[in-house]
Amino acid sequence: MSASNPTPAAAGLGPGGPADPEHDPGATYALEPEQTAALTALVVSSTGEEVPTYTPLTGQRLAMMPQSSADDVEEAFVRARAAQREWARTSLEERSAIMLRLHDLVLERQDEILDLVCWESGKARKDAFDETLHVALTARYYARTARKHLGTERKIGVVPGLTRVELNRVPKGVVGIIAPWNYPFTMALCDGLPALMAGNAVVTKPDAQTMLTALYGAQLLREAGFPADLWQVVAGPGRVLGSEIIARADYICFTGSTATGKLIAQQCAERLIGCSLELGGKNPIMILRDADLDRAAEGAVRASFSNAGQLCVSMERLFVADQVYDRFVEKFVARTKALRLQPGLDWGSDMGSLISEDQLKTVTAHVEDAVSKGARVLAGGKARPDLGPYFFEPTILEGVTPDMTCFGDETFGPVISLYRFSDEADAVARANEGQYGLNAAIYSQDGKRARAIARHVKCGTVNINEAFAATFASLDAPMGGMRESGMGRRQGAEGIHRYTESQSVATQRLMRFSPVLGLSDEAFAKIFTANLKLMKKVGRP
Ligand code: NAD
């Protein structure tokens, strides 16, 4: 730890005051040691190997995390498959009841979860709160809509009255989930809950930086009443364990970078298993000339700097109408400069730390590259080692051009570039540039016009007069990326149907699909042709 990094006490952190890692290298701040031990025991690991995990707030050690081998992944799948066979026989009502208990547990333990998420990810408490909120919303949504999404559905049969068709949703089996670090509690649980609801088991590999939070989620699932073996957690490098999981899973849910997503898609293609990929973005926000500028400035701050910009749906490009550019920018810059940056577990911070040195390097490189090529810094622009090892100021850039890295590459940090536009169609065309298409936002007081514009934006979600929360928290609506921002959708019907196979069961009564009573094939074909004409005439689909 460098001398400029504060101890937990200096940062106002930690239950027991400062603990210098030189003197107390095993210090665990987030949880009591026995709690940490109970969590790490949930990792399927027989290797005897452990790697330390650290808090980005101070750089101090949080836990020694057991590591999993290929054999451990195999063991996780053996356990998960056995548990899944039993689980698939449970009723939807039984599963819903457990899901609702999870909902209540998350709210009861909220404070402890928020502490842990802050410690492990370095984020501000209000950003951690979004995670418990999202897990609770997801648990309630899938518990309450289970029958609608999974109940046997009647379909139209080919011969009215005589062909009865039913659609069953059959669980895939064991779902592999590979998750990132940016929303450790949400990412640990939210994609897995519909998989469980649909009768699957899960083997998950959370990111190495946020294992404790993911394990806490696994422990809550058990407490809520899900069978212990239904949810298996393995730990280790994604490159190694990812392939082991893909080699055994019946479906893969991946969230992470586009580069890794492409590798995962290739491996899934080899085995002809399905996958959903929630990937990167370079999300645009558009402020139209009739926008409520105070509301837009508030939204733009949240859009750009929530979770220090380490949010898949956060904005990195801001297009502002000429007529309101100066007034909007003045408000946006003022609000950004007023943001409180501080390490800590309390509610006093508006923006927390980046997760790691790698993230800090990327963000710093993007800003330095832009500035060296002529971009102007309107707010922020530098690292803040006085606050913690990986803090970086919320940064607004103007004059960003296509030769600068941050023009098209995802920064995944608190950096937004401002662009002026005079023509809305041109703004949409510029917003659609690049390979991504995850999330967009439009601010306008004319909702109808904004919704019409949204149809031309090539993004999986578009928020009007809101940054991202309106779509993200509306669990009934699918969420995911177009183009290189992903494949498949989480949330809503698509978010649960991805974990099922559709099985059509047709029961044919009386009539059969071949000639009867000595009818020739030709006569049979004529009768069927007449029937086709009749069905069209009576308006049958
Ligand atoms: P990453 O792709 O490096 O890692 C994500 C996960 O994949 C980690 O668990 C990692 O261990 C694992 N992994 C890494 N290499 C692998 C491989 N070869 N095979 C299998 N697994 C592998 O991404 P990251 O840097 O941790 O996360 C940030 C990225 O995630 C950003 O691009 C962000 O936009 C994206 N993201 C997207 C969403 C979304 O919903 N669209 C949400 C959060 C983050």
Image: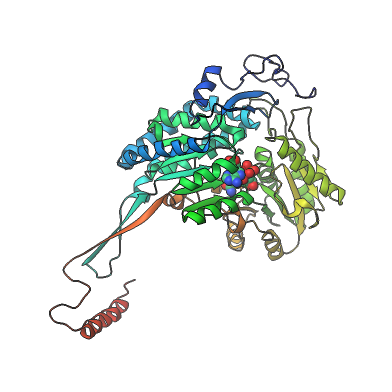
Residue at image x 58%, y 59%? 451
- Colour mode of the rendering: rainbow
- Image quarter in which the N terminus is found: top right
Which quarter is ligand 1 in?
Answer: top right
Eyeballing the image, is 9 above or below 289? above
Residue 472 location in percent, x, y?
55, 46
Eyeballing the image, is 518 above or below 64? below
Residue at image x 21%, y 67%? 161
Residue 279 location in percent, x, y?
60, 50
Residue 269 location in percent, x, y?
51, 56
**Residue 479 visible in the snapshot:** no
In depth, the one of 407 and 215 nearer the eye is 215
Q: Does residue 288 appear left or right of residue 369 in this picture? A: left
Count of marks placed on residues = 0
Q: Does residue 226 appear left or right of residue 246 in this picture? A: left
- Image quarter in which the C terminus is found: bottom left
